[in-house]
Image (spheres, helix red, strand yellow):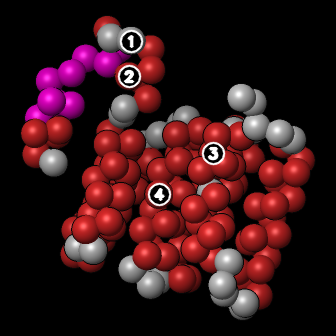
Amino acid sequence: MHQAEEAYGRARPHRERAWTRFLDPGRMAAFQLSTYVRLGDEHHVIEAGQTALSAVAQESDHKKAAIVYADIAQAQLQIGDIAEGITYARRALESAQRSESTWGIEHLATVEKALAPHTDQAVRELLGDIAATRRKAGPSPA
């Protein structure tokens, strides 16, 4: 993880290939977050989540924000914080809707799977809103 951070710190994405511009501080923080989630390291999950949130707060690109929020939502759900997971999933959905990002909407699929077994009203409303947004957006471009 530290080697990746160092390499990213030396990188100049705006002078590289166009796709590398996506690797901004928010996405790097989200990668850290998802890594710590997979490792089951709750302490680092919370810390990485805060870093990702700080990066998103500075973002004006709603497409990127949608992805980061979805990653944070997934992390919260995996550590068992359903309420926070719903909050960040809702933010991801709203950012994806604002930017009309089918990629952001599709990124919510893992959140949908994690929420599927839950039956409370807030979960059902969120899942319904995600499904309605997906229908409205139409098929994802291939």
Q: CA distance from mark 2 to mark 3?
A: 18 Å
Q: Secondary structure at mark 3?
A: helix
Which is nearer the N-term, disc 2 or disc 3? 2
Q: Which residue is mark 1?
A: 17
In percent of the image, x 29 and y 58: which residue is there?
35
Q: Nearer the viewer, residue 25 or 78?
A: 78
Q: Nearer the viewer, residue 112 or 104?
A: 112
Q: Nearer the viewer, residue 66 or 139?
A: 139
Q: Percent position (x, y) of residue 73?
A: 51, 66
Please check the rendered image and state whether residue 13 is part of the magenta-colored stretch, yes or no: yes
Mark 4 burial class by Cα count in 10 Å: few <14, some 14-19, many 20+: many
Residue extending furthest top?
A: 15
Q: Which residue is mark 2?
A: 20
Q: Which residue is mark 3?
A: 104
Labels 1 & 2 near each other (Cβ < 8 A) = yes
Which is nearer the N-term, disc 4 or disc 2? 2
Q: Percent position (x, y) of residue 108?
A: 62, 57
